[in-house]
């Protein structure tokens, strides 16, 4: 098998040829055809998350030590089953749910693998999908996503799912309510499509990049605000008449958090999904006085990913912009993502990767 591995944090990924793993027990070996490139891969590549105030969370402290294969938006073909594996057959095309927990704790038994403390997340603590092959612990994590574009399907495993689960944390919205989407990269674009599928059209897209804002309006946002302006908060209030019931933050930096929380109407919900980094200081009385909620949402559950796939298959969800590139362009892609140059999602094509030639 071929994988593009983090050999040293922050340095270009290196192509490595390794023995293709043999699935044991209930494991399933999936040959990857499409692999989405997510912004959080940058953190794993760089080796840390910025906690603000000079504090960092190092990914090596949760077992992610180079050489390591990142990538958590895997789509592929079942190539081999372990002796106890069942539920799929060789040749089945499947989307892989990557947020796999231990499988036996109370959280996992409640179907919330993504909040398990003994996580086996693919591309985070286990070898991920910047590779021709991935071992999945059990066929139950494989989802039939037939009928939709494979590149787009891959992106549903993280960007689609994260957007869906973040939106699910908003209460039912009244027709006059507005939602602001902070950050119009892959996640924000998916969220705009999903809000619309949920019947929400009062959406304001917020970003610092005019090209992304234009794409967000094409995607269905009713309005957009360039948040570099000092009057961004005033603009949001005037566009929405002050009726912002939800703020979805797909960036997660002090500027977006402060803006999202400040913009909320009384009783509104700020949901943090982005992991850009930093810290903020919040005055406590207004949180109570305004009756607002500040909460986080991390990726999503297996059940939610099945709902996302069903939504996509129903035709109600407008596909997010996806650009498919040869897998060998992974380093260029990471650099572009780092520079904020990617519109929507880049998906790596491993289907046409010949391990012997690529390495
Ligand atoms: Zn991701
Ligand atoms: Zn668990």
Image (tube, helix red, strand yellow):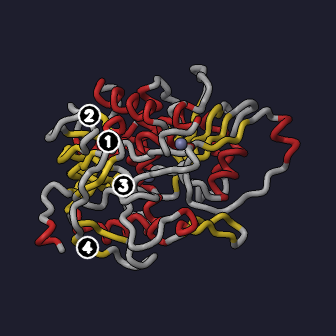
For the residues marked 4 and 1, what is the alpha-carbon distance in whole angstroms?
A: 26 Å
Q: Are dots 1 and 2 in contact, CB under 8 Å?
A: yes
Q: Which residue is mark 1?
A: 26
For residue 349, above or below residue 237: below
Between circles 3 and 2, the one closer to the viewer is 2
Residue 247, x across and y down, in percent: 61, 40
The reply to whether callout 1 and callout 3 are in contact (CB within 8 Å) is no
Q: Position of residue 25 (x, y in %)?
A: 31, 45
Marks 1 and 4: in contact by CB < 8 Å? no
Q: Which residue is mark 4?
A: 16
Residue 190: horizontal and vertical position, in percent?
A: 41, 41
From this viewpoint, which residue is outermost toward the right? 285
**Of residues 145 and 52, the one drawn nearer to the viewer in this rendering:** 145
State the separation of the CA atoms marked 3 and 2.
39 Å
Q: Is residue 202 above or below residue 277?
A: above
- Quarter assignment of residue 1: bottom left
Among numbered discs 3 and 2, the one appearing first in the sequence = 2
Instruction: Identify which residue is drawn at 45% across, 76% down.
Output: 9
Distance CA(mark 1)–CA(mark 3): 38 Å
Disc number for residue 343: 3
Q: CA distance from mark 1 to mark 2?
A: 7 Å
Comparing 53 with 350, the one in front is: 350
């Amino acid at each position: 098998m071929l994988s593009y591995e983090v050999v040293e944090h922050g340095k270009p990924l290196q192509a490595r040829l390794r023995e293709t793993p043999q699935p044991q027990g209930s494991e399933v070996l999936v040959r990857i055809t499409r692999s989405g490139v997510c912004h959080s891969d940058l953190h794993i590549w760089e080796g840390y998350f910025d906690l603000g105030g000079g504090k960092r969370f190092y990914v090596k402290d949760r077992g992610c030590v180079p050489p390591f294969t990142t990538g958590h938006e895997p789509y592929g073909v079942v190539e081999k089953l372990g002796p106890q594996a069942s539920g799929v057959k060789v040749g089945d095309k499947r989307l892989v749910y990557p947020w796999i927990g231990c499988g036996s704790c109370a959280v996992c038994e409640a179907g919330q693998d993504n909040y398990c403390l003994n996580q086996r997340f693919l591309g985070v603590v286990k070898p991920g999908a910047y590779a021709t092959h991935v071992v999945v612990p059990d066929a139950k994590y494989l989802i039939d996503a037939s009928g939709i574009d494979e590149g787009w399907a891959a992106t549903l495993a993280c960007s689609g799912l994260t957007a869906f689960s973040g939106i699910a944390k908003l209460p039912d919205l009244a027709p006059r309510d507005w939602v602001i989407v902070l950050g119009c990269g892959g996640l924000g674009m998916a969220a705009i499509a999903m809000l619309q599928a949920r019947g929400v059209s009062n959406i304001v897209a917020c970003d610092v990049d005019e090209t992304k804002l234009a794409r967000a309006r094409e995607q269905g946002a009713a309005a957009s605000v360039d948040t570099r302006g000092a009057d961004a908060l005033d603009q949001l209030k005037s566009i929405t008449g002050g009726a912002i019931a939800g703020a979805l933050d797909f960036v997660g930096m002090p500027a977006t958090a402060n803006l999202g929380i400040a913009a909320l109407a009384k009783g509104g919900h700020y949901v943090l999904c982005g992991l850009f980094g930093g810290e903020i200081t919040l005055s406590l009385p207004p949180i109570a006085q305004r009756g607002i909620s500040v909460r986080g949402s991390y990726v999503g559950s297996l059940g939610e990913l099945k709902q996302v796939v069903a939504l996509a298959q129903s035709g109600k969800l407008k596909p997010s912009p996806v650009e498919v590139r040869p897998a060998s362009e992974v380093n260029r892609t990471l650099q572009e993502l780092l520079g904020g140059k990617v519109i929507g999602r880049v998906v790596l094509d491993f289907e046409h990767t010949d391990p012997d030639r690529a390495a």
